[in-house]
């Protein structure tokens, strides 16, 4: 009787491992950023935390302060969405970036370096909350006054 129970037990473990490995994993994708980017990506299946206009510096503070939005009379916190996500797409700072594109007197290269520092800081803050992969969408100029 004990042998039969042991055989059944090991078969059950073996089947559980096979089922676990063959079950497709659900990927939770979170988009954080400006509404302006939504037309550039296929966002229908993403969780979204949207801003009308946000810079990388402001986004850093939003993550630090754990911003929330109210959806269906419920508070949804940014850090909770970050921790549940396996992929995070960030599209921010484009409205501010366009100001530099339109005005040739402003130093856009210096501005890009400053933003890279904020991107690194955002990545560090997110990595403390989640092990998810982070993708930053590139800023683009709507009016091509600059190359």
Image (cartoon, helix red, strand yellow):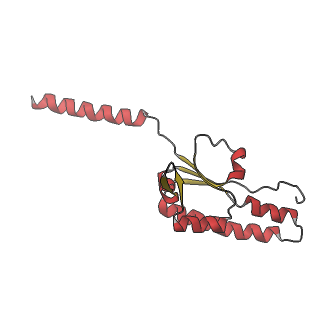
Q: How many marks?
A: 0
Q: Image quarter for residue 94?
A: bottom right
- Which residue sits at x=82%, y=56%? 141
Above or below: residue 85 compared with residue 7: below
x and y, in percent, of residue 71 in the image: 53, 50
x and y, in percent, of residue 72 in the image: 51, 48
Q: Nearer the viewer, residue 96 or 132?
A: 96
Q: Quadrant of the N terminus?
A: top left
Q: Is residue 102 left or right of residue 45?
A: right
Q: Nearer the viewer, residue 23 or 61?
A: 61
x and y, in percent, of residue 114 in the image: 71, 71
x and y, in percent, of residue 54 in the image: 67, 62
Question: Which residue reaches farthest front?
Answer: 73
Q: Image quarter for residue 105?
A: bottom right
- Which residue sits at x=53%, y=54%? 70
- Which residue sits at x=68%, y=64%? 55
Above or below: residue 116 compared with residue 5: below
Q: Is residue 94 left or right of residue 101?
A: left
């Amino acid at each position: 009787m004990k042998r039969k129970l042991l055989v059944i037990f090991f078969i059950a473990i073996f089947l559980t491992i096979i089922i676990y490995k063959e079950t497709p994993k659900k990927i939770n994708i979170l988009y954080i950023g400006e509404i302006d980017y939504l037309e550039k990506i296929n966002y229908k299946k993403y969780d979204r935390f949207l801003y009308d206009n946000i810079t990388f510096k402001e986004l850093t503070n939003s993550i630090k302060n754990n911003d929330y939005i109210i959806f269906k009379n419920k508070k949804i916190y940014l850090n909770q969405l970050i921790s549940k996500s396996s992929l995070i797409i960030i599209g921010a700072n484009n409205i501010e970036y366009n100001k530099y594109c339109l005005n040739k007197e402003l130093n856009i290269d210096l501005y890009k370096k400053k933003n890279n520092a904020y991107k690194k800081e955002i990545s560090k803050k997110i990595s403390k909350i989640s092990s998810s992969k982070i993708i930053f969408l590139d800023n683009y100029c709507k009016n091509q006054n600059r190359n």
